[in-house]
Amino acid sequence: MASRRSEDTEDLRFRVLKLVESQPDLSQRDLAAALGISNGKVNYCLRALIDKGLVKLSNFSNSKHHLGYVYLLTPSGIAEKAALTRRFLQRKVAEYEALKAEIEALRADVGAKDSPEGVAEATHGK
């Protein structure tokens, strides 16, 4: 089983790749705001994705006097995003199932305590 830290890193990579794919012209500041993390963390993550060849940074001209940047997923980045999506979904389904089981156990516990037998046990210290 993966450590919590590696899962968090993988989730961040997934979320960055997802945003970059859907909105390639977002600035690092916009990405940070959308993800609820610091600009430095976005910069570090993007640099790692660029170094791995998953994201490509390209210049484009917004106007005559302004150069902008666009982040594009490479073919490797698209494949990695698909793999991350599968693993992310598997983790979230497992979390959902565990939470669902915990909720059912709590409901059963509350239901038992609300029943006449549960009230009698609580009153008599059984």
Image (cartoon, rainbow, N blue to C red):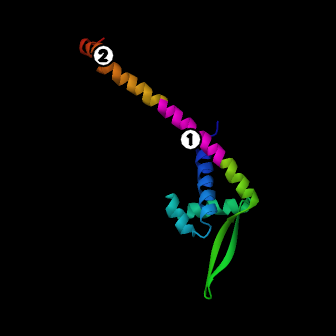
Q: Does the stretch in magenta take in 91?
A: yes
The residue range painted magenta reads 85-100
Amino acid carrying label 2: it is Gly
Residue at the image position 68 percent from the left and 59 percent from the top: 48
**Quarter of the image with the N terminus in it:** top right
Which residue reaches farthest front?
Answer: 22
Residue at the image position 57 percent from the left and 68 percent from the top: 28
Asked if 107 appears above or below 26 in the picture, the reply is above
Q: Is residue 51 visible?
A: yes
Asked if 13 appears above or below 25 in the picture, the reply is above
Secondary structure under tag 1 reads helix
Asked if 5 appears above or below 1 in the picture, the reply is below
| 1 or 2: tag closer to the N-terminus | 1
Question: Residue 92 shows which numbered tag?
Answer: 1
Question: Residue 118 shows which numbered tag?
Answer: 2
**Quarter of the image with the C terminus in it:** top left
**Residue 105 point in image, percent of width and height:** 43, 25
